[in-house]
Amino acid sequence: MHSKTNKALSLFSSGDLAGALKIFKTFRIGLTADERRILQIAQESLTGKESFYQSLQLNTEAIKQEAIQIIKQKYSL
């Protein structure tokens, strides 16, 4: 049986960032509240809510890049 982490890393490696973030945003251990929020905003931006976050004056492109960096840093990719 595959763990959630393995599934998320597999999706991330295959280029499915939205799918990977959908799983990663639910993780509690090893992530700060701010990191979880970044992952959540990035995932929601990729799945149709980007204009909402942009209306809040958030730079969604920068947040998506930060989410990628969080994953790479936490999982040594």
Image (tube, grey):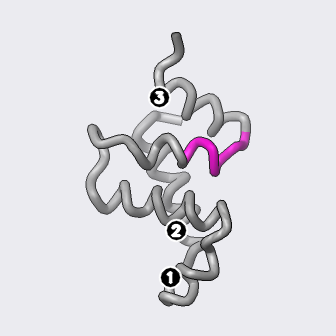
Residue position for label 3: 5
In the image, residue 3 lies at what x, y percent? 47, 20
Q: Nearer the viewer, residue 71 or 18?
A: 18
In terms of sequence position, does the residue under pointer 2 or pointer 3 come before the other?
Answer: 3
Q: What distance separates the C-alpha of mark 2 from that of mark 3? A: 21 Å
In terms of sequence position, does the residue under pointer 2 or pointer 1 come before the other?
Answer: 1
Residue position for label 2: 63
In the figure, is residue 30 to the left or right of 48?
left
Q: Circle 2: is it few (<14), some (14-19), or many (20+) Cα within 10 Å?
A: some
Residue at 44 percent of width and 44 percent of height: 73
* Kind of residue sitting beneath label 3: Thr
In the figure, is residue 32 to the left or right of 6?
left
Which is closer to the viewer, label 2 or label 3?
Answer: 3
In the image, residue 59 lies at what x, y percent? 55, 80
Q: What distance separates the C-alpha of mark 2 from that of mark 1? A: 8 Å
Callout 1–callout 3 Cβ contact below 8 Å? no
Residue position for label 1: 58
Q: Which residues are magenta?
A: 15-21
Work out whether 6 lies above or below 56: above
Q: How many marks?
A: 3
Q: Main secondary structure of the magenta part?
A: helix
